[in-house]
Amino acid sequence: MIDLYSDDHFMGEALKEALKAMDMDEVPVGAVVVSNNRIIARAHNLTERLNDVTAHAEMQAITAASNYLGGKFLNDCTLYVTLEPCTMCVGGLYWARFGKVVFGASDEKRGYQVNGGKLHPKTELITGVRANECSDLLIEYFRTKRK
């Protein structure tokens, strides 16, 4: 039986968003925001389509969730994202005061953990959820780009 309220389930929803990005020839990163066990925002990278370097999945998700809830603080929300946030995105997550952040694949080059960013002190962090699936999608995307 599938637990519809598990980190695994919601990361699967973020993976669906990453596939949408890939279909649009965007770097396949997807995100969902969950509040009270319900998805309130879905997003994926749109940097190419919008010609905007800030249009990362996380930033799109923060905006969508804030608009949905009518407030800028998301302390009762969880962000699920397929790739470790960059420094810019973790800054947005910090200011939005997310209650929990869950990411799949680590980003050893551009991730916030190696580049000095930090989450809000009250934010719970879970890493490595469906990491292989998240990572494999990125590897596949960049492999096709390099051909």
Image: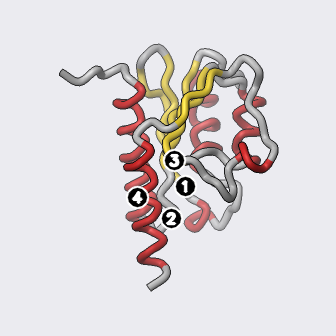
Q: Position of residue 127 (x, y in %)?
A: 54, 34
Task: Give the SS element for disc 2.
Answer: loop
Query: Could you tell which of marks 2 and 3 lies nearer the N-terminus?
Result: 2
Q: For residue 133, which numbered disc appears in the image?
A: none
Residue 116 visible in the shown view: yes
Residue identifier under label 4: 137
Instruction: Please tell me how crowded label 3 is: few (under 14), some (14-19), or many (20+) other residues with Cα within 10 Å.
Output: many
Q: Amino acid at mark 3?
A: Ala
Q: Amino acid at mark 4?
A: Leu
Query: Could you tell which of marks 3 and 1 lies nearer the N-terminus?
Result: 1
Q: Amino acid at mark 2?
A: Glu
Q: Is residue 98 above or below residue 129?
A: above
Choose between 56 and 129: the one closer to the eye.
129
Q: Position of residue 69 (x, y in %)?
A: 59, 22
The image quadrant of residue 73 is top right
Q: Is residue 133 above or below residue 127?
A: below
Quarter of the image that includes the N terminus = top left
Query: Could you tell which of marks 2 and 4 lies nearer the N-terminus?
Result: 2
Q: Amino acid at mark 1?
A: Asn
Residue identifier under label 2: 26
Foreground disc of the pair 2, 4: 4
